[in-house]
Image (cartoon, grey):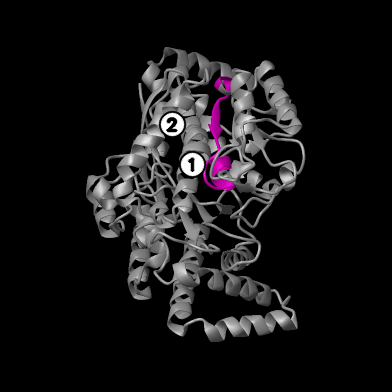
């Protein structure tokens, strides 16, 4: 049972007796939530809806045509009109402000919207609390600072000069902390001199708008316009423009309670985390979660694409889900198992050392997880030893020991923060799911994060590199059909090797026509 505030014994007994007289529907009213996602990628949209609805919730999204896709920005005005005229009564709303202001996540990095128009859209947000007199959970993003980027998800110039902009942002961040050496000051000046003024200026201007918008959103949260606001740090580094802006926002919000506002590592997991928070608050429950780390660096691991060690970012995400950290495994409703690299060095899952053999650390951690399961604990695994996929050796060991199928949830996708957020959220919601639906979601993530990301994707990526066709990773073009045929065949073959996925029927597609993500459609 999840933790509840204790009631006096007589009152609790009376409530239980009264509840027993009510119809089942009245005892457990279905939670209905309006949900505006960042875009239509499965991890932001379909997988989120599937998770919540497997636990009996009703999640209502805007029409598909209004949501950002790989080939278009979303339609903020269309979403506003939908909210005003089409949205049925709901218990809560979880809203991506990037979709309502810019038209989605990619649009927030590439738009040319004037500050005046953004301010007009902000006024809509101010009126939203009156328009929807329900609990509003909102999430925004701090513009990311990638080391490099391809595939039209940044301004066009970023593919050519992205590494130089990233280097400039590191020096800029360090300069704002008064830590630049004389040599670094000269390097910063050289970059400013050599980068084209229009391109660097365009990037800096958009960042400034983003920071101003996020500052205004924190003012709205402070004034009660949102029940809860999260601002996510997209692809990030300990020295970067994203880190600099997060620090500035932190300074202006230091007195705000984490129950009202948080700055969180990662972005794509926030929609699901906030829906789970709405679910917990609607039921007046606060699950307790104990983070269990694998041997080695463990909680001190600094993941790729992040400026925070797991010991700092994991507690943030537990709070964001409306949960609290347990002091011991025995006191926890859910064990969050975190598979981290023993040396603390995180690589991409396509790395050559991601092989199908387990290490002593893997075997020790597998035994620790089995011990918790044997004690009757619910365990959700965040597999963050590698970025963008699973640890082949560890997962193979868990599958052979029949431990995988005993998990409440599994996640190993994209960044460590994304995987951890999903592992928390799906681990909590699994307790309210029928076993069949829980198993379906577990298999979906195993197929996506392990079979596809760490194996089928790895093979295709290496083949494209070998033939000097790196461009196809970001736009599959005419290669999409043969690649789809290969990955479906490969993932199905892997599924038949392990008990946890044996007999699964599924289909893989490329929702954004790029290699980076797939949609795994599970067939009942």
| Cα–Cα span, label 2 and label 1 | 10 Å
Query: Would residue 521 be found to the left or right of residue 461 on screen?
Result: left
Give x and y (percent) for residue 353: 64, 41
Residue nearest the viewer, comparing 18 with 401:
401
Query: Residues at badges 2 and 1 in contact (C-beta under 8 Å)?
Result: yes
User: Image quarter for residue 128?
Assistant: bottom left
Residue nearest the viewer, comparing 26 with 387:
387
Residue 406 highlighted magenta (yes or no)? yes
The quarter of the rendered structure image containing the N terminus is top right
- Category of crowding for the residue at label 1, using alpha-carbon neighbours closer than 10 angstroms: few (below 14), some (14–19), many (at least 20): some
Q: Residue at x 61, y 55 (%)?
A: 306
Q: Which residue is mark 2?
A: 490
User: Image quarter for residue 93?
Assistant: top left
Give x and y (percent) for residue 362: 70, 31
Q: Residue at x 72, y 47 (%)?
A: 344
> What label does residue 299 carry, if any?
none
> In this picture, which residue range is highlighted in magenta?
405-421
Q: Which residue is mark 1?
A: 459
SS for dot 2? helix
């Amino acid at each position: 049972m999840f933790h509840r505030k204790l009631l006096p014994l007589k009152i609790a007994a009376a409530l239980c007796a009264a509840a027993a007289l009510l119809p089942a529907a009245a005892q457990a009213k279905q939670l209905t939530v309006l949900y505006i996602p960042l875009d239509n990628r499965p991890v932001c949209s379909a997988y989120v809806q599937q998770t919540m609805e497997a636990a009996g919730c009703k999640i209502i999204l805007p029409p598909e045509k209004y949501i950002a896709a790989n080939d278009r920005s979303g339609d903020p005005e269309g979403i506003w009109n939908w909210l005003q005229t089409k949205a049925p009564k709901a218990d809560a709303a979880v809203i991506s402000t990037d979709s309502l202001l810019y038209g989605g996540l990619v649009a927030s990095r590439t738009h040319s919207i004037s500050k005046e128009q953004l301010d007009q859209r902000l006024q809509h947000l101010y009126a939203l609390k009156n328009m929807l007199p329900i609990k509003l959970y909102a999430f925004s993003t701090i513009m990311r600072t990638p080391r490099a980027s391809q595939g039209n998800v940044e301004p066009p110039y970023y593919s050519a000069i992205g590494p130089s902009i990233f280097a400039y942002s590191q020096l800029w961040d360090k300069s704002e902390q008064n830590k630049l050496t004389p040599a670094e000051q000269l390097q910063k000046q050289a970059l400013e001199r050599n980068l084209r003024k229009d391109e660097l200026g365009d990037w800096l201007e958009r960042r400034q708008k983003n920071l101003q918008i996020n500052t205004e959103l924190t003012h709205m949260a402070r004034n009660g316009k949102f029940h809860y606001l999260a601002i996510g740090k997209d692809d990030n580094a300990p020295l970067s423009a994203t880190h600099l802006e997060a620090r500035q926002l932190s300074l202006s919000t230091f007195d705000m309670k984490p129950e009202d506002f948080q700055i969180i590592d990662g972005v794509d997991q926030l929609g699901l985390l906030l829906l789970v928070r709405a679910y917990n608050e609607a039921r007046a429950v606060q699950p307790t979660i104990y983070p269990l780390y694998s041997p080695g660096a463990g909680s001190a691991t600094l993941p790729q694409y992040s400026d925070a060690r797991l010991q700092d970012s994991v507690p943030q995400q537990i709070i964001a889900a409306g949960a609290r950290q347990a002091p011991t495994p025995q006191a926890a409703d859910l064990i969050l198992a975190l598979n981290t690299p023993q040396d603390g060095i995180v690589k991409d899952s396509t790395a050559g050392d991601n092989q199908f053999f387990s290490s002593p650390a893997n075997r020790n951690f597998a035994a620790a997880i089995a011990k918790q399961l044997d004690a009757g604990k619910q365990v959700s695994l965040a597999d963050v030893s590698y970025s963008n996929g699973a640890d082949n050796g560890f997962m193979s060991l868990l599958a052979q020991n029949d431990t995988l199928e005993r998990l409440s949830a599994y996640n190993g996708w994209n960044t460590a923060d994304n995987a951890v957020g999903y592992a928390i959220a799906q681990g909590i919601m699994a307790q309210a799911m029928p076993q069949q639906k829980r198993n379906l979601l577990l298999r979906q993530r195993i197929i996506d994060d392990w079979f596809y990301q760490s194996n089928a994707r790895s093979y295709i990526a290496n083949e494209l590199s070998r033939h000097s066709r790196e461009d196809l990773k970001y736009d599959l073009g005419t290669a999409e059909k043969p690649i789809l045929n290969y990955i479906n065949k490969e993932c199905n073959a892997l599924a038949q090797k392990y008990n946890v996925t044996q007999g699964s029927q599924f289909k893989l597609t490329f929702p954004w026509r790029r290699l980076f993500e797939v949609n795994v459609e599970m067939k009942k």
